[in-house]
Amino acid sequence: MDKKIPKTFNDIKLYPMMRMVGVMTCSTIFLVGCASTPAPTEQIATSKTAIDTALSAGGNEFAPLQLKSAIDKMEGAKHAMGDKNYVLARQLAEEAQIDAQLAEAMARTNKAQKAAEALQESSRVLRQEIDRQIQ
């Protein structure tokens, strides 16, 4: 039994093939890691639409802080796009969209509350008129 037991990894005959597989794997991981992030143009457009919707819902009047935050973040996203920092641009655009949606929801909620209050006031006035006619 003259089998030689390999003492180091270099003694194994499969070493060149394993090294090739390792190099290919590392190269693939490196290339995938270095792949450029695409420009978030779709997210920017979606966020802009959300801001426009919040404006039309009355965000300036009912949720000015949230709307201003959305607009500021959108400006930051546009600046990051100019700097080709697409990761930051996407993050800011997503945050701007969320802030704009919050502003829109707050505006619609405030409008609904005001409408409910007006309806309650109308109902109260009507009750008073009915009570006065009965007496």
Image: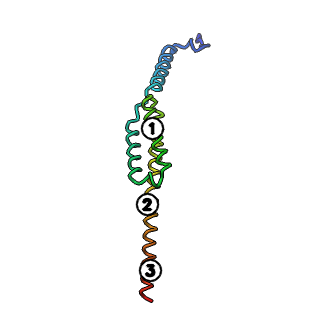
* Figure quadrant of residue 122: bottom left
Q: Earlier in the sequence, mark 3 or mark 2?
A: 2
Residue at (45%, 72%) from the top-left corner? 121
| Residue 95 to residue 56: above or below | above
Residue furthest out toward the top = 2
Local SS, label 3: helix
Q: Earlier in the sequence, mark 1 or mark 3?
A: 1
| Residue 122 to residue 133: above or below | above
Local SS, label 1: helix
Residue 21's spot in the image, x, y percent? 47, 19
Read off the residue under disc 1. 75
Read off the residue under disc 3. 127
Residue 116's spot in the image, x, y percent? 44, 67
Which quarter shows the N terminus? top right
Read off the residue under disc 2. 111
Estimate how packed mark 3 is, as few (under 14), some (14 to 19) or many (20 or more) residues with alpha carbons within 10 Å.
Answer: few
Residue 113's spot in the image, x, y percent? 46, 63
Residue at (55%, 14%) from the top-left corner? 12
Q: Amino acid at mark 1?
A: Glu
Residue 48's spot in the image, x, y percent? 39, 43
